[in-house]
Amino acid sequence: MGASHNARVPTAPSPDEPVETDETLMRRFAAGDMGAFDTLYGRHELAVWRFVYRSVKVQAVADDLLQDVWFAVARTAGGYQATAKFRTWLFTLARNRLVDHIRTAKHHASLDANGDDERSLADTLAADSGFGPVRQLQSREQAAALIAAVEQLPFDQREAFLLQAEGDLSVQEIAQATGVNFETAKSRLRYARASLRQHLKEFA
C-alpha cells in the first residue's frame, strides 16, 4: 500500500455494463459472493486508506488500519442492514478504528505530507466549488500549506473535514459516522473551513 495507493486507478465498468450499488454488492457478499467483496474493495480502498493515513501519517500503520477496517466489513457482513449508504457505514467503521488507534497510540504522527499525497487532497479540494481560494490550489507550496493547515485543526474539525474531502460524505452522513447531530457536524465543518481559509489567505 502507500505509493501503490496513489497510483491506483479504480476500474470503470463498460458503458453497457450495469453498475450495482454498494448496498447490493454488500448483500451479495453477505450471501457468500466474494466477487462482490472484491468490487467493493476496489471502489473504496483508496479513499479509506487516505482518510486514515492523513491522521496517522505512517504508511505501515495506515495499511494495518485499512486491513482492520476491511476485516470488520467481512466480519459484520452477515448482520449488515442498509439503513444508511454503504459508504457512510464503511467510513464509520474506519473512523471508529482510527479513534481507537489514536486513543492507544503513544504518539500522534504529523499529518505533514509530500508528493502525490499532497496533491490528492489538494485536487479534492480544488474540485470543491464552495471552498473559495482553495479552488485555485496548483503549486506544491500551496498543497504543502494546505496539509499543514489541516494538521493544525482540532481533531473533531479535522475528522469532519477529511470525511467530506476524502470520504465524500454529506453533512448528514458525517453526523451519522461521528455520532453527533446534524448541527454539530455542520458547525465543525464551518469552523474547519474558516480556519483553513485563514491559514491560506495569502493564496487567495
Image (spheres, rainbow, N blue to C red):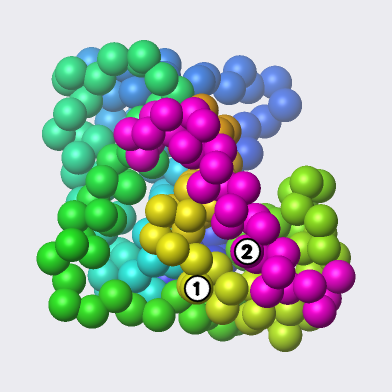
Give neighbour class at mark 1: few <14, some 14-19, many 20+ (Cα, 10 Å).
some
Quadrant position of the C terminus in the picture: bottom right
Query: Which of the numbered marks, if any, corresponds to residue 152?
Result: 1
User: Could you tell me residue 55's position as x and y percent?
Assistant: 39, 66
**Residue 48, placed above or below residue 60:** above
Task: Say which element carries label 1.
Answer: loop
Q: Amino acid at mark 1?
A: Gln
Task: Specify start and end residues of the magenta stretch as a single range.
Answer: 175-204
Toward the viewer: 36 or 90? Answer: 90
On whether residue 104 falls in the magenta region, the answer is: no
Instruction: Classify residue 143 as left or right of residue 147.
Output: right
Residue ID at (40%, 80%): 110
User: Could you tell me residue 198's position as x and y percent?
Assistant: 71, 69
Report if the CB atoms under discs 1 and 2 are less than 8 Å apart.
yes
On whether residue 198 falls in the magenta region, the answer is: yes
**Residue 68, placed above or below residue 26:** below
User: Could you tell me residue 152's position as x and y percent?
Assistant: 50, 73
Residue 138 seen in the figure: no
